Amino acid sequence: MKKGIKLIIVSLATIGLALSCSTKKDSFINRTSHSMSTKYNVLFNGNIAFDEAKAELDRSYEDNFWERLPIEPLKIDEKLIPFPGQPAGDDDEVTGFEKAEEKAVKAIQKHSMVIDGFEKNNQIDESYLLLGKSRYYLQRFIPALEAFTFGLENYPDANLYRETKIWKAKAHVRLQNEKLAIETLKSVLRNFEITEEEYEKAHTAMAMAYTQLDSTDRVIDHLKQATSYFTDQNQGPRNLFILGQIYREQQKIDSSNMVFESLSYMKKIPRKYKVHAVLERAKNYSEADSTSIIAFTLQELIQDRDNRPYLDELYYQAGLIELKNESFERSRGLFELSLIHNTSKPYQKSLSYERLGDFYFDRNNFEFAGAYYDSVLQIPIDQNTKRIRKIIRKRESLNDVIFYEGIARRNDSILGLVNMSEEERDIYFKGYIEQLKIEYEAQKQLEEQRNANTGVGEFAITNNNYSDGGTFYFYNAQVVGFGKQQFKDKYGNKSHGDFWLIANNVGISSDVQIKETAVALDTSLLFNTAYYKEQIPKEPRVIDSLNFIRNDAYYNLGLIYKEQFREYEIAAVDFEKFLENDPIENLILPTKYQLFRTYANFDEEKSNKYREDIVSNYPDSRYAQIILNPSNVLSDGNSDDGPDYLYKLAFVCYEEEDFEYSLRTVNEGLERFKGLEIERKFELLKAYLLYKTIGEELFRTKLNDIILNFPNTEESEHAEEALAKLNEIKNIPQQN
């Protein structure tokens, strides 16, 4: 009997349990069972996966604080948007958002209780919200929108109704349906039951929508509304930070400063916003600010060990402050510290390299400047920005400067010796030889010291216990340095490659011969005045050639400094040197005109001097007419000898495809009107003629020359646009 009762009880319990698993029977047990199972099992695990994936997304997202931050830190990349069922990553590993989506789908499929047209499981609305959010972060915005819409239409009385509408609006923004998003959010904000958290999220989403519509005033308004409450410790500071950036864009510096200062004093916000708020405040630095306070604040952050990831930016900004206060050496040191502490920020590293390049460029140390600009161009960042294109042009111009400066220095030195008397040469070379002897003795002592430190024979390193680097040879920097110098002393500067020691290897034999000659050189010649005096050229033909090349270098340097770098004082010095040294007759007048224009930028008295010289001594020249009445000369279309007429003639021939005659006319114009403003028009037309007659490669080269030689002109802008179009055409994928 007892066994029968037990069997009945077990049977009833089993039947009850089975009935409670049914999604078709509306009973308290069924509703409670499915609701609890959804909330504490499926959705619990789904929400954990979602939260972990969202936290990882926030950690991995890299903000570019040199631009206005996006309101929502989500990088949208169309190439990475997966199809339904396809993993979001490059491999088959399931992401956290995919796992959350899977759990949401499972909750809906297994625990939804739609009976008589009504959902009896009060957790299903949250399942649809989780489903939509997961798809949103997987960048599948249309399926996400479908999930949000279904949840709203079928669960209008759910607790998460307003939050779901906010997410639906964000999906509309991502799909560029901003007006629908705004209408949806307005309905949320009109609801009198809205919570502080929903209020902040709704206004943040509104700011996203108006950002897409480029309505800055509305963006400001909604960001201000969103920052009324700081319920979200990540999004709240971000909204405030963006607000400060927008105020700066609108030149409302005081408002921008207030925002960034308030952020810098907040405690329970992510460190990146606190640190960058101080940096942004420093970017707003003006003469009205207290330099000592800003510098002290930056130094405090630098000394805080928790700010080590931001040291490169802090040192860089401190360097900019010193630069604005003309503490140039201190700024240089800070920029170098910025580079030392940069480990993973290519854009910041490029800025530091650029500033150091500018530092040496401003001091005419062009080789150092060129090296730093080269470092900028080697960093893997977008090379097609205006800033990088400007650096590329500047670097290419430096090649010409270094080339012509080298020629000018070398030929000046030689011609200086040519013009010396015998007595002056003796005095000069005696002083030179005395300096050589000092260097020679110093080199001998250094060699003896090396031998003493490295052993009796070459590379004979016998002491294997190096105090500063362990036991391996290459762990000791001093010993490695000695080894490198010994190699260089014996073999010279060798290029990398196989069989470098074989004399008949291409590109090697000349180096070896030069080094052997240097080693075998008799010191009696090295310290002999007569030996050097014999090297001075004596033939008039050679001397004239040196003078011609030197003068050509000075003229070109003057043009480069004036037109490309706007270094007018340096340009004037080079033009003056050109005139002092027996210049070519047909370039004297153009050079005087260049000096008239160059001095006009910083020395009115000297500019007027050259003006009077040209007007008085060359009254019939076109340069004199340009100075006296420039508008008439350059717009004289009736004169068959004028620059405007010649250009029009060349252009008409170009349009009629008589390229040969057009090119001859252009070359004539370039020769006759060198230095005038119309020169750049001739150069641009010549670029198109070369494109038609020779090809694209030379066309590109010519366009780059125009950008370099005539910056900030209509012609250089046209050349940049032409190059950009060529690049676009080149990057268009070919259709099969």
Image: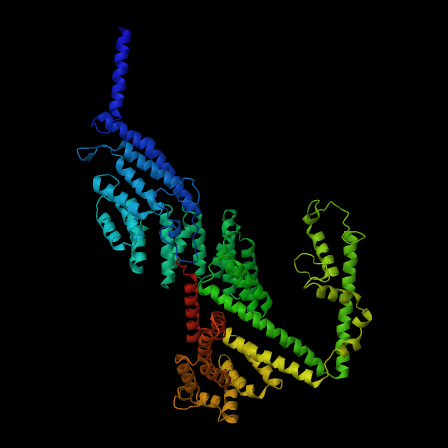
Q: Position of residue 399 (x, y in %)?
A: 57, 70
Q: Is residue 98 above or below residue 353?
A: above
Q: Position of residue 455 (x, y in %)?
A: 79, 51
| Left or right of 121 in this view: 610 | right
Name the residue nearer the viewer: 167 or 326.
Answer: 167
Q: Quadrant of residue 364?
A: bottom right
Q: Quadrant of the N terminus?
A: top left
| Colour mapping | rainbow
**Visible in this render: residue 225?**
no
Name the residue nearer the viewer: 415 or 334.
Answer: 415
| Left or right of 56 in this view: 29 | left
> Residue sitting at 50 percent across and 68 percent down?
393
> Residue sitting at 54 percent across and 84 percent down?
591
Q: Quadrant of residue 64?
A: bottom left
Q: Is residue 167 above or below residue 292?
A: above
Q: Quadrant of the C terminus?
A: bottom left
Q: Is residue 182 above or below residue 524?
A: above
- Total marks in image: 0
**Visible in this render: residue 241?**
yes
Direction top: furthest residue: 1
> Residue sitting at 32 percent across and 43 percent down?
133
